[in-house]
Image (cartoon, rainbow, N blue to C red):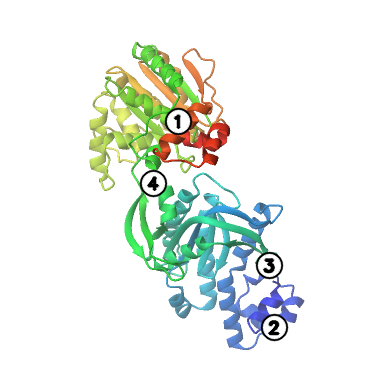
């Protein structure tokens, strides 16, 4: 759609020659003021107001940005295809009241700031802004770029959008958003429209369900449908809303409000539960890890690097080793790298220290400091170490542990050394199993600490297990204390046994049985269980 056609849709086609003569394009349109419109010959105040309101709803700059992204990411051939899509629909609460209170130019500024805030959040999580609809934003996770965790990305984006909109400071107006999220199969079809109005058509119930859930959500809440809830496991805390009658959808629809990310640190446990099914295959790999543990207990510290494709069983093997050692005297330290905190220095360590100290969500800083001191008492570290690590956890300095005056680089180096001394102090008391999960997501400072840990490991009763995907390039191979363990896909017999276990004794179609025996890709993802 060109600007002339857009003006015609507003009943303002008489002004098209003036817009054309002054070369007003979509980007310039978003910047027009009431004075500019008067200079263009729009003498009637009602016409000016109508056009300014339309510009506020359109946010042409955001639409142009979305169109540029669509042209960059859209497939070369716009053929219809089936996709599992997670759709997020974000709405600005009270926009009708805002339009009555604010001048159209001010309203345009508010809407534009809201659009930018949502787009920035979505872009950071690799989602796709499909359409701006005035006070609504339609977002896809899973198209055009698909990820293993699109449902999680959508919910994190929803929570972050609510927070970002709440913090907007524009025209002294308090803004609130609400979000609906749904996941399901859709058909992504041909491109509709031309130019900045071009969009990818999505056919299916999922976008409608997300929009309906958003309309039912309270201000500053995220409401999700059952399909999304199944994929999230215990990654978040929820409030069950029961079943909801939704217009246009047959039967009541179960819904949940997402409250916040959960305190469960392990993504593996959050997605699959703490009760694990029997391990199928991997006997040789487990035996190797147990042999390395025997050497570590004797004081010859060991490092095992476990590499494999997503879902092939890296976390399951680490969990199995912990189970096998349950009856032995040992300390287990677990660190979980996160795809959402790769820019947060020492995030896995901060997370582990908080869990080990027993921090509660509503603990005041003084209570957290006392818990940290109690945790460190076992290793009896110097006062400076306690001060450095308390600072790492954003806790205030205390008279008992004064913080030294250090440059940022020197403080980082001393903090890493303090963490290593803490490990050494604990290792003097009992052998330690350290598990670093998902090192492909590790932040640079945690990588430095892991380097130091592996360097000191030979002199400590420590078994360090590091799991990662093939794209991660470890620099520790070749050292005498380091063993590389690459996980291959299960063989035919183990794949069949795994499928039968998951099916719970139910009869499977012949086609499924054939796939489990002949096509590794059909079942390798199940080996994570």
Per the image, the residue denoted by label 3 is: 193
Across and down, in percent, residue 249 comes to 45, 67
Q: Are marks 2 and 1 in contact (CB under 8 Å)?
A: no
Per the image, the residue denoted by label 2 is: 13
Earlier along the polypeptide chain: callout 4 or callout 1? 4
Q: Quadrant of residue 318?
A: top left
Q: The C terminus is located in which quarter?
A: top left
Residue 55 located left or right of residue 184:
right
Per the image, the residue denoted by label 1 is: 497
Earlier along the polypeptide chain: callout 2 or callout 1? 2
User: What's the CA distance linking mark 4 and mark 2?
Assistant: 53 Å
In the structure shown, which secondary structural element does the residue marked by tag 4 occupy?
Answer: loop
Across and down, in percent, residue 272 comes to 39, 40
Q: Which mark is residue 32?
A: none
Q: Residues within 10 Å of mark 4 (few under 14, many from 20)?
A: some
Earlier along the polypeptide chain: callout 3 or callout 4? 3
Q: Residues within 10 Å of mark 3 (few under 14, many from 20)?
A: few
In the structure shown, which secondary structural element does the residue marked by tag 3 occupy?
Answer: loop
Q: Are marks 1 and 3 in contact (CB under 8 Å)?
A: no
Residue 443 located left or right of residue 10:
left
Of badges 4 and 1, the one in the foreground is 1
User: What's the CA distance linking mark 1 and mark 3?
Assistant: 51 Å
Q: The N terminus is located in which quarter?
A: bottom right
Of badges 2 and 1, the one in the foreground is 1
Per the image, the residue denoted by label 4 is: 233
**Residue positioned 45% across, 24% down in the render:** 282
In the structure shown, which secondary structural element does the residue marked by tag 2 occupy?
Answer: helix
């Amino acid at each position: 759609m060109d600007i002339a056609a857009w003006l015609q849709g507003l009943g303002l086609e008489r002004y098209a020659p003036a817009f054309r003569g002054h070369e007003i394009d979509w980007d310039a349109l978003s910047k027009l003021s009431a004075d500019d419109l008067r200079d263009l010959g729009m003498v009637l105040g009602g016409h000016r107001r109508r056009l300014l309101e339309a510009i506020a709803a359109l946010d042409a700059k955001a639409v142009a940005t979305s169109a540029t992204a669509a042209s960059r990411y859209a497939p070369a051939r716009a053929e219809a295809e089936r996709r599992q899509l997670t759709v997020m629909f974000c709405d600005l609460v009270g926009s009708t009241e805002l339009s009555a209170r604010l001048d159209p130019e001010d309203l345009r500024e508010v809407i534009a700031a809201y659009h930018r805030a949502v787009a920035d959040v979505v872009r950071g999580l690799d989602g796709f802004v499909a359409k701006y609809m005035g006070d609504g934003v339609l977002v896809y996770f899973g198209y055009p770029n698909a990820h293993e965790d699109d449902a999680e990305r959508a919910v994190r984006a929803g929570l972050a959008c609510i927070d970002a909109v709440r913090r907007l400071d524009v025209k002294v107006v308090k803004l609130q958003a609400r979000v609906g999220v749904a996941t399901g199969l859709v058909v992504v079809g041909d491109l509709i429209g031309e130019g900045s109005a071009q969009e990818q058509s999505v056919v299916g119930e999922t976008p409608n369900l997300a929009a309906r859930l958003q309309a039912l959500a309270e201000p500053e809440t995220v409401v999700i449908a059952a399909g999304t809830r199944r994929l999230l496991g215990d990654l978040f805390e929820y409030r069950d809303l029961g079943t909801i009658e939704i217009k246009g959808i047959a039967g009541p629809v179960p819904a949940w409000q997402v409250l916040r990310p959960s305190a469960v640190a392990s993504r593996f446990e959050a997605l699959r539960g703490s009760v694990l099914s029997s391990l199928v295959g991997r006997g040789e790999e487990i035996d190797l890890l147990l042999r390395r543990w025997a050497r570590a207990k004797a004081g010859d510290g060991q490092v095992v690097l476990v590499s494999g494709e997503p879902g092939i069983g890296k976390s399951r093997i680490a969990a199995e080793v912990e189970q096998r050692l349950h009856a032995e005297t040992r300390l287990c330290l677990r660190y979980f790298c996160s795809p959402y905190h790769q820019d947060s220095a020492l995030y896995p360590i901060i997370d582990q220290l908080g869990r080990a100290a027993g921090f509660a969500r509503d603990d005041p800083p003084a209570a957290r400091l006392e818990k940290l001191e109690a945790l460190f008492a076992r290793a009896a570290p110097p006062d400076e170490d306690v001060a450095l690590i308390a600072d790492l956890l954003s806790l205030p300095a205390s008279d008992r542990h004064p913080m030294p005056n250090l440059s940022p680089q020197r403080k980082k180096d001393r903090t890493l050394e303090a963490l290593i001394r803490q490990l050494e102090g604990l290792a003097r008391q009992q052998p330690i199993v350290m598990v670093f999960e998902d090192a492909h997501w590790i932040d640079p400072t945690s990588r430095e600490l892991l380097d130091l840990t592996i360097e000191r490991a030979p002199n400590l009763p420590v078994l360090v297990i590091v799991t990662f995907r093939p794209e991660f390039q470890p620099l520790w191979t070749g050292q005498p204390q380091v063993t590389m363990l690459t996980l291959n896909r299960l063989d035919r017999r183990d794949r069949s046994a795994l499928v039968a276990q998951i099916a719970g004794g139910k009869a499977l179609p012949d086609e499924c049985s054939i796939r489990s025996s002949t096509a590794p890709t059909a079942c390798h993802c199940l080996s994570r269980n």
